Amino acid sequence: MKKQNFNDYVEFSNERFTKRVIFKENKTTIFVLNFASGQTLPAHKHPGSNVQLMVMQGEGKFTIDGEDIPVIKGDVLFVEGDEELAFTNNSTSNTSLYVMLNKIPNENYAKDI
């Protein structure tokens, strides 16, 4: 059993969004993405993986396969690996996303940035 506190991984930067890995076990990684106002996650895919995302604080807009999906605190999304995913914090407050990535394609997906 391992225990962590989500708030320990909430860390914002004025330069770019941050990613803080909470757990990495086998092919599953759990991390937090933190976005200051106006910051974005570029469009990308997770081939062979599924992604679960939960808005823990703030709000923003996901773009999944070209469709804009507004989200607020408490919203949960399930994204399949071949769906293209992007995120924009289009609000004036900070936004943090809890992310669980199953079957990571390679080790680059499980690193802090």
Image: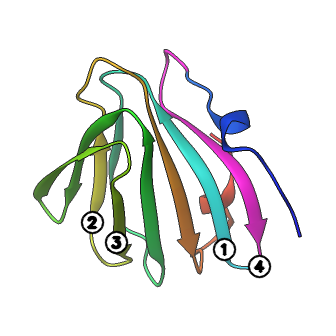
Where is mark 4, residue-wise? Answer: 26
- Mark 4 and mark 3 lie on one chain; the one further toward the N terminus is 4
- Mark 2 and mark 3 lie on one chain; the one further toward the N terminus is 3
The amino acid type found where label 2 is placed reads Glu
The amino acid type found where label 4 is placed reads Asn
Magenta stretch: give its range. 13-25
**Point 55% across, 20% down: residue:** 13
The amino acid type found where label 3 is placed reads Val
Q: 10 Å neighbourhood of mark 1: few (<14), some, or many (≥20)?
A: some
Q: Is residue 108 visible?
A: no
Local SS, label 3: strand
**Point 45% across, 70% down: residue:** 51
- Mark 2 and mark 4 lie on one chain; the one further toward the N terminus is 4
User: 58 or 26: which is nearer to us?
Assistant: 58
State the predominant SS element of the stretch in magenta.
Answer: strand
Q: CA distance from mark 4 to mark 1?
A: 6 Å
97 relative position to 111: left or right: left
Local SS, label 2: loop
Q: Residue furthest front?
A: 74
- Mark 3 and mark 1 lie on one chain; the one further toward the N terminus is 1
Where is mark 3, residue-wise? Answer: 79
Q: Are marks 4 and 1 in contact (CB under 8 Å)?
A: yes
Q: CA distance from mark 2 to mark 1?
A: 19 Å
User: 100 or 55: which is nearer to us?
Assistant: 55
43 relative position to 52: left or right: left
Disc ID at residue 84: 2
